[in-house]
Image (cartoon, rainbow, N blue to C red):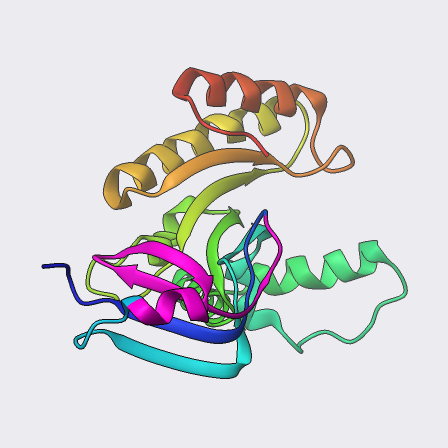
Amino acid sequence: MRDAATILRAGWLIRASEPPIADGALVAAGGRIVRVGPWRTIEPHVGPGDAVEHSPDSAVLPGLVNAHTHLGLSDMAGKFEPTENFPAWIGRLTARLMLRSAGTVRRAVETGRDLALAAGTAAGAEMTHDPRLADPLAADPLAEECARWTVFGELFRFGEKGVARVGRTAAALEDLARRTGLAVGLGPHAPYSTGPEVFMAARREADARGWPVT
């Protein structure tokens, strides 16, 4: 006797590497997708205990992957007037960042996490200035739905100060991974904001721990 299944029938079933299916259905049981196909091929196998959800005007598609997020800035939406150039915008952003408390940042991460999940994000890479504040991205075993996140410590600066920051960030990431089980990595920001010596130090630290670099 098989487990009862949940069947999602939709106007379109979008697959990652194959053509979409009109009037398609997805069968899930035991926490796994066990079958997909046209509704006409699924319907004969629907059991009396199965739950069928029919959304003819909708599409079912794979979860989205957001490869670069700043969820910790979610509370900044709508707080900036247009600036003349990028440096001016960065200046305003940095000034606001310096005024926020740890609690404010954590709440912003939570808000961004929830908005991303509601929009269909199944996995993401969060860029953070302070890994200690990324705890809300840890998987919640009691939640019905949650996304998988990798937290990257974002690196800036040049010279010895920048290299020293790599070590401190790596230590904070190790602590985050140990406490939460989150996957972690290092993320040098950009050539205009991060020196080549910092890029190389990040690569060494990441390789020594088996972490990704972005």
Above or below 118: residue 188: above
Q: Residue at x 74, y 58 (%)?
A: 91
Above or below 23: residue 67: above
Residue at the far right in the pictured view: 84
Total label count? 0
The quadrant of the picture occupied by the N terminus is: bottom left
Residue 44 visible here: yes
Q: Residue at x 48, y 23 (%)?
A: 206
Residues 45 and 82: in front is 45
From the top left corner, tell me how far across and down residue 172 is, in percent.
38, 37
Above or below 16: residue 158: above
From the top left corner, tell me how far across and down residue 173 is, in percent.
39, 37
Residues 41 and 52: in front is 41
- Any magenta on residue 158? no
Q: Residue at x 19, y 64 (%)?
A: 142
The quadrant of the picture occupied by the C terminus is: top right
The magenta span reads 18-44
Above or below 27: residue 56: below
Residue 114 visible here: no
Residues 54 and 95: in front is 54
- Any magenta on residue 35? yes
